[in-house]
Image (spheres, helix red, strand yellow):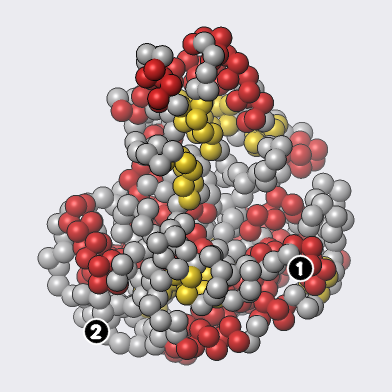
Amino acid sequence: MTKRNILCLVVILMFFFGNFLAAQNIKTTDSNIPRLVLVLSVDQMRTDYITRYWNKFQAGGFKRLVNEGAVCNNAQLDLHIQKVSTGTATLFTGVDPATHGIINDSWYDRLKKKEVNCIEDNYFITVGSDSKEGERSAGKLLCPTIGDLMKIDSRNKSKVYSVAMNDVSAVLSAGHAADGAYWFDTQNGNMISSSYYVDTFPEWVRQFNEKSFAKTYTQREWTTLLPVSSYEESLGDDYILEKGYYDKWNTFPYNLKKIKENAGSYKFLKTTPFGNTIVKDFAINLMIAEKLGKDEFPDFLAVTFASMDYENNSFGPASVEMEDTYLRLDQDIALILDYLDKAVGKGNSLVVLTSSCSSMYPVDYLKEEFKMPGGTFSPESAIALLKSYLNITYGQGDYIEEVIDQQLYFNYDLLEKKNISLADIQTKTANFINQFEGVKIALPSSSFAQGDYAKGQLAVIANSYNFKRSGDVLYQLEDGWQPVYKYQRTIYNDNSNIPLILHGNSVIHKQILGKTYGQDMVPTIMEILHMPIPDHCIGNILEEVLK
């Protein structure tokens, strides 16, 4: 599929959602429109990290964004499955998973009768590596991203790019028509892309990879930026509930060479500050090489920092490792902002700081230290009991075809063969799951077709339900509860608060105390760019922040 075909596909998609393409081309010379929109997204960033580490931050990073920008103190990203995939797609399209279709990292495809990943696509090949980590596309994303909208509005004159450690973040923030999306190849430590975006690997990227930053970082130790005794905002470095790397390394300093040998790849770099630094260096190189913000058409760049990535559960939000990661990220962000001042002009860019998902404190920590209610829920045990119940109720059979996180998919062929009503088995299953301790609510998908949960506290599940991709029964855990699996790593979050800060000449410096939503980012940026807002966007323009 060529870039032209992809762009045509997006144009058709845009007409489907509303005819708003009649607006004139927007140029940065038309008014006070930023020459470059830069979205800095930090995976699993809690909003309290900024206040917690405030006294240790330098002036030019997080502090500058807060002291000069518009800060939304109560921003929410309410999703049934809160992951980087669902959050990124929601942030950059401005719509819920029910519409953009990215309901999880993966889902069960009933036609193919197999689980499918949200971005994996073997029709395309890796560009910049011999591995298969570039076989990715945004083909399963059903809505245009803000970058897609900018490409269409400018008649392909705006440049759109994304950079991330994770492929999911890079692809879903870039969208369909981006000029390039780059991410970290965990096998060889290079920055790579997909033929979905890049036909010919740029020379500047090849030169960047030749510097072998990943290899260099794994030859050193990770020591604290400041004396470890000064990290008073965190738990002790040897806190007993910290599992650490591979359940055996949980105190500074960390011998990264030894961890690399144990890991067998560069994947663990995502959990260190050096992964963020590689992304920072690559992003600045990209802005220089591709001349972003240098002409009359506004450009777009999404930069995603991996923070502690999945090792967040091994160390926790209150760990010394987390604090050190953010103190170093603060320096990385300061360098990016400094580059923008010099290359684009102070205030001529719009910088947005946000996150595709937050993080929760481990259940053991909350119970042990604060006697908070909560606990762990075993999905595997619950499903085993459910299967026994269904066999007693309907006779012997494998009624559950797939279970993916908090979603259950039934075996439709078996139900048809046994003449079992889908609505009946969905309702009985939901009622059964509702009896488990730790389950807040289980809902049959048949109810969503009737619009029963369009409003109220259960709307978060309804808004995440996609008729073609979601399961037959969806459930949600009580606050403070966390699933624990016997044979797989737990990736779970129930904290919907995310940071949302806008910085630049086009916004006012102020604190927004009222509730805002991650879905508000797209319409607000488009309003700042004087671009038409498509009908399908559900967010609101944050009028309070606009000049």
Identified at 74% across, 52% down, the residue is: 314
Q: Mark 2 = which residue?
A: 29
Q: How busy is the neighbourhood of tag 2: few (under 14 within 10 Å), some, or many (20 plus)?
A: few
Give the answer, above or below, for where 154 lies relative to 73: below
- Which element is circle 1 on? helix
Residue at the front extreme of this rendering: 417
Q: x, y (%) of residue 113?
A: 44, 38
The secondary element bearing badge 2 is classed as loop
Whether residue 526 is visible, yes or no, is yes
Horizontal and vertical percent for residue 371? Answer: 77, 33
- The nearer-to-camera label among 1 and 2 is 1
Residues 132 and 545: in front is 132
Q: Are marks 1 and 2 in contact (CB under 8 Å)?
A: no
What is the number of the mark on residue 537? Answer: none
The quadrant the C terminus occupies is: bottom left
**Residue closest to the eye, 479 or 190:** 190
Residue at the disc numbered 1: 260
Q: Relative to the observer, which residue lies in front, 352 or 422?
A: 422
Going by the numbered disc 2, the residue's amino acid type is: Thr
Pointer 1 or 2: first along the chain: 2
The answer to whether residue 139 is left or right of residue 286 is left
Q: Residue at x 75, y 54 (%)?
A: 315
- Toward the left, the furthest residue is 22
**Label 1 crowd bin: few (<14), some (14–19), many (20+), radius 10 Å:** some
Q: Is residue 113 above or below residue 240?
A: above
Residue 110 in the image: x percent, y percent? 40, 37
Residue under the point 31% across and 48% down = 538
The number of callouts visible is 2
User: Which residue type does callout 1 highlight?
Assistant: Lys
